[in-house]
């Protein structure tokens, strides 16, 4: 038997193991994900203003402003850093899953599925998912 680690390098993303759901809502979202989003919104509401959460603090805002000036393509819109909720959700769910591989196939059952979730709703961007395989 071998194993595979599926991991995110992003602090607002998670890799989760969940059941594949056949039914979707009118927006095309799987119903289990919709239910999960409803529960999470009650526990960790989306950050819409700078007063919703303590994060980001003054020093972090300054750091990100400097980063946006030094890094081509990095957003300089401060509203995009109002993502404390995304960081907390990613911390809650974690950034990786480890799968056992047998005969070249993951042992995830007939309805198991691996999802890469970007909790940050403030801007579109490229995300990277890393895989590490170990074994024969």
Image (cartoon, rainbow, N blue to C red):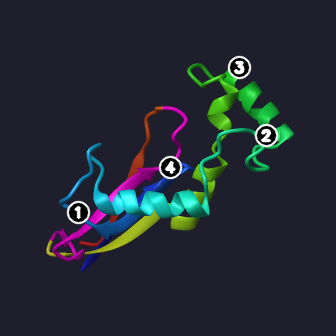
Residue 60's disc is: 2
| Magenta-span inclusion, residue 114 | yes
Which one is in front, 105 or 76? Answer: 76
With respect to residue 39, does 46 lie above or below?
above
The spot of residue 94 in percent (x, y) is 52, 64
Disc 3 marks which residue? 69
Query: Residue 65's spot in the image, x, y percent?
Result: 75, 27
**Precedes in sequence: disc 1 or disc 3:** 1
Q: CA distance from mark 4 to mark 2?
A: 20 Å
Which of discs 2 and 1 lies nearer the camera? The answer is 1
| Disc number for residue 5 | none
84 up-or-down from 115: above or below: above
- Magenta stretch bounds: 104-123
Q: Disc 1 or 4, which lies upstream in sequence? A: 1
Q: Quadrant of the C terminus?
A: bottom left
Q: Is residue 94 visible?
A: no
């Amino acid at each position: 038997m071998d194993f595979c680690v599926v991991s995110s390098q992003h602090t607002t993303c998670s890799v989760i193991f969940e059941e594949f759901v056949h039914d979707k809502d009118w927006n095309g979202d799987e119903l289990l994900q919709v239910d999960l989003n409803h529960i999470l919104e009650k526990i960790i509401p989306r950050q819409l203003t700078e007063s919703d959460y303590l994060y980001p603090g003054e020093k972090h805002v300054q750091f990100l402003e400097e980063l946006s000036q030094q890094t081509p393509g990095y957003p300089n819109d401060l509203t995009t850093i109002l993502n404390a909720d995304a960081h907390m959700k990613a911390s809650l769910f974690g950034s990786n899953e480890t799968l056992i591989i047998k005969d070249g196939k993951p042992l995830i059952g007939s309805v198991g599925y691996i999802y890469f979730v970007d909790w940050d709703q403030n801007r579109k961007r490229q995300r990277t998912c890393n895989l590490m395989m170990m074994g024969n």
